[in-house]
Image: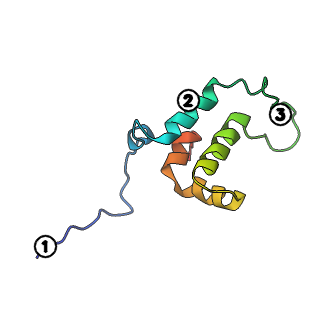
Amino acid sequence: MPQIEGSSRHQIQIFALEQAIAADNPVRVIDAFVSTLSLEGLGFLIKGEGDEGRPAYAAEMLLRLYLYGYLNRMRSSRQLEKACRRNIELWWLLNYRG
C-alpha cells in the first residue's frame, strides 16, 4: 500500500507568517490591545537611547510576550524563551525576523 511521505528538509520553502495565523487567533487580540496602549502614560520606562551596551528590547514587545505567557500559563523566562524559538504564534506576535 502506498504511503504519504514528507518533503525534503533541505528544500527551500517560502512561508508567510500572516497566512499561518488564523484571523480568530488570540495573539491578534494581544497585538491589537497592546497597540492601543500608551505605555509611557502607564508608567513604562522607555530606555535604549544611550550608545553604551546592547540595545534594549522594545517595551511593547516585552508586554506582548508577558501577556502571551500569562494567557498560556508560561510563568518562567525559560519557558518563554523556549516558546519564542518554537512557536509560530510568537514569531508573528513579536515580529520575528529570523
Whether residue 13 is situated above or below residue 37 in the rendered picture:
below
Mark 2 nearby-residue class (10 Å; few <14, some 14–19, many ≥20): few
Query: Looking at numbered disc 3 in the image, what kind of residue is underneath it?
Result: Lys
Q: Secondary structure at mark 1?
A: loop
Residue at numbered disc 2? 32
Give me the C-alpha separation between circle 2 and circle 3: 23 Å
Q: Are marks 2 and 1 in contact (CB under 8 Å)?
A: no
Residue in the image at 61% along x and 56% along y: 73
Query: Looking at numbered disc 1 in the image, what kind of residue is underneath it?
Result: Pro
Please name whichever residue, 97 or 72, is drawn nearer the observer in this view of the structure.
72
Q: Residue 87: percent from the left, percent from the top?
A: 52, 53
Residue at numbered disc 1? 2
Please name whichever residue, 83 or 57, is drawn nearer the observer in this view of the structure.
83
Q: Nearer the viewer, mark 2 or mark 3?
A: 2
Residue at numbered disc 3? 47
Q: Quadrant of residue 42?
A: top right
Looking at the image, tell me whether mark 1 or mark 3 is earlier in sequence order.
1
